[in-house]
Image (tube, rainbow, N blue to C red):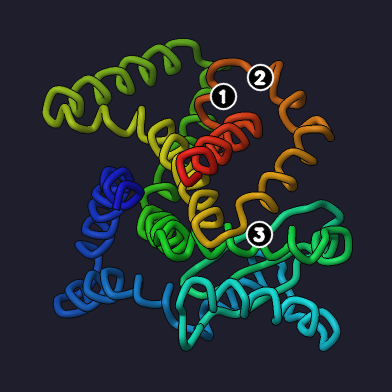
């Protein structure tokens, strides 16, 4: 819910773009266009669309028989501990040489080939439990839904930036044109801000979404710990920390740290230790 609420300004911007486009269409078609866009979010939960998303955008593939034989018992154990009688999730493989996993759309869980071959089974189960935490918390589908409905607005912003760059390049030959474009741009920004002050929220939305992402990671860690995978997940995170996961972020500037979608490893480890201490 936090992610969806933070995506609301993007949705409103996209809705305005869709409404603007609909005015260029014949009567009847315009209403159908708007309704189709509003209903298109249901595709996020449509299995064939999810599989297409996994294959084309995420570059995941279906596991081989041997890979599935290694993953399935671990995932079944996670489902058993979570009291999921009829699991509806699909396991996928990402051909990357690093330890990672991800939850996507409404029912997809991807694991890197490296994780499958290098992690101990108990540790891999802990990583899977973490990804299940994202699904149980709705983080995966909420993020994808927000991205989908924000697409028209982002596309409009991209076109606007391209047009502005073209005008600025042209203005190098005509300085007066550059000054005129600058004045018009400032006037438009001021006008929109005065007429609709909440638009300023768009400026801080990326930082708020990044904060929500970091909070979601900690909640997914807690879910794994609640299911009994706390020590194993602690071992995985500690190993990442020893490999320099936090060191790589030490020189990041404040803006980069605020835009990070994952907390530093030491924070995740500390939160797991707090949960273990509280649980006795």
212 vs 192: above or below: below
Q: Which residue is mark 1?
A: 257
39 vs 18: above or below: below
SS for dot 3: helix
Query: Mark 1 or 2 closer to N-term?
Result: 2
- The image position of residue 104, as x and y in percent, is 55, 65
Which is more toward the observer, 26 or 73?
A: 73
Q: CA distance from mark 1 to mark 2?
A: 6 Å
Tell whether 48 sits left or right of 77.
left
Q: Which residue is mark 3?
A: 126
Mark in the foreground, 2 or 3 = 3
Q: CA distance from mark 2 to mark 3?
A: 29 Å
Tell whether 156 sits left or right of 165.
left
Residue at image position (66%, 58%) is 127
Q: Which residue is mark 2?
A: 252
* Marks 1 & 2, CB-CB < 8 Å contact: yes
Tell whether 154 sits left or right of 96.
left
- The image position of residue 43, as x and y in percent, is 41, 77
């Amino acid at each position: 819910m936090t992610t969806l609420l933070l995506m609301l300004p993007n949705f409103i911007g996209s809705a305005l773009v869709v409404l603007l486009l609909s005015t260029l269409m014949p009567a009847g078609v315009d209403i159908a266009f708007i309704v189709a866009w509003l209903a298109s979010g249901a595709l996020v939960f449509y299995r064939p669309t999810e599989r297409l998303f996994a294959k084309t955008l995420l570059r995941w593939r279906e596991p081989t028989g041997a890979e599935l034989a290694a993953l399935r018992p671990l995932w079944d154990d996670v489902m058993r501990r979570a009291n999921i009688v009829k699991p509806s999730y699909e396991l996928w493989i990402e051909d990357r040489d690093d330890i990672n996993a991800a939850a996507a759309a409404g029912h997809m869980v991807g694991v890197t080939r490296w994780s499958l071959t290098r992690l101990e089974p108990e540790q891999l189960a802990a990583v899977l439990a973490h990804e299940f935490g994202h699904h149980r918390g709705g983080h995966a589908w909420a993020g994808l839904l927000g991205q989908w409905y924000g697409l028209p607005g982002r596309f409009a912003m991209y076109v606007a930036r391209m047009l502005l760059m073209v005008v600025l390049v042209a203005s190098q030959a005509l300085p007066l044109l550059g000054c005129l474009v600058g004045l018009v741009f400032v006037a438009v920004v001021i006008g929109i801000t005065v007429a609709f002050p909440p638009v300023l929220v768009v400026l801080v939305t990326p930082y708020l979404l990044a904060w929500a992402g970091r909070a979601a990671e900690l909640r997914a860690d807690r879910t794994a710990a609640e299911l009994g995978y706390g020590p194993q997940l602690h071992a995985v995170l500690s190993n990442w920390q020893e490999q320099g996961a936090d060191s790589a972020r030490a020189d990041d500037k404040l803006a980069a740290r605020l835009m990070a979608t994952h907390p530093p490893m030491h924070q995740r480890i500390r939160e797991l230790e707090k949960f273990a201490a509280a649980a006795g």
